[in-house]
Amino acid sequence: MVHKRVRFNLKPGDIIQLPVRPSGFAFAKYTPEHSYAFYKLISPTDKVPSNAELVNSGVMFRIFVMDRPVKEGEWKVVGYGEVENDLLRPQKYFIQDAIRENNFEIYEEPNRRPATRDECKGLECYAVWSQNHVEDRIEDYLNKRPCKWVEAI
């Protein structure tokens, strides 16, 4: 499949639309820390909901994502909405040492500190997600099942 490259210059507040299986669309907002906040609202059509509808639905998760799906037009910038206060603050993430699996840190821009496994529970991993893993995670959320990509971290 040949993908059309699109102009890529995301701004905090840009609303991104992405397809979810079997049919429908999910929405995310680009944040000042360069992460994406994915909303719980899923639309059966490509009609873009208002910013208020997205915010009122709540955030499913907030993570860093590779640029490719937006750059290649698979995920589309479809609007803009003011960034809500919760998304203006840096999010805490955990980091797990790849070699010493019992070594953890908590990262909260711009600081890192040692942490225990228990302190990291409930935090997102400080990682950059690929398109298919994000789409799988949304499907798993909608189907109320554990996400193998979250559990693998």
Image (cartoon, rainbow, N blue to C red):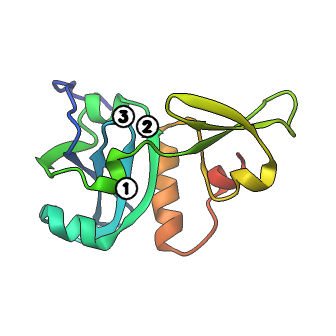
Describe the element under mark 3 as helix, strand or loop. loop
Camera-side mark, 1 or 3: 3
Q: Residues within 10 Å of mark 2 (few under 14, many from 20)?
A: some
Could one spot residue 123 in this view of the protein? yes
Residue at 21%, 43% (x, y): give it: 76
Place of residue 58 in the rendered image (x, y in percent of width and height, measured from the top left): 35, 68
- Does residue 131 appear in the picture of this structure? no
Q: Outermost residue toward the bottom?
A: 144
Between the residue at mark 1 and the residue at mark 3, the CA separation in whole angstroms equals 13 Å
Is residue 66 shown above or below 13? Answer: above
List the residue tagged with mark 2.
65
Cα separation between marks 2 and 1: 11 Å
Task: Give the mark toward the camera: 2 or 3.
Answer: 3
* Residue nearest the viewer, comparing 126 with 137: 126
Residue nearest the observer in this picture, 102 or 69: 102
In the depicted structure, whether residue 110 falls above or below residue 135 = above
The C terminus is located in which quarter? top right
Q: Which residue is mark 3?
A: 34
- Amino acid type, residue under disc 3 in the picture: His
Identify which residue is drawn at 50% across, 67% down: 141
Q: Secondary structure at mark 2?
A: strand
* Residue 38 tag number: 1
Q: Amino acid at mark 2?
A: Val
Judge left or right: residue 61 versus residue 108: left
The percent position of residue 33, horizontal first and vertical second, equals: 37, 35
Q: Quadrant of residue 144?
A: bottom right
Image quadrant containing the N terminus: top left
- Upstream in sequence: badge 2 or badge 3: 3
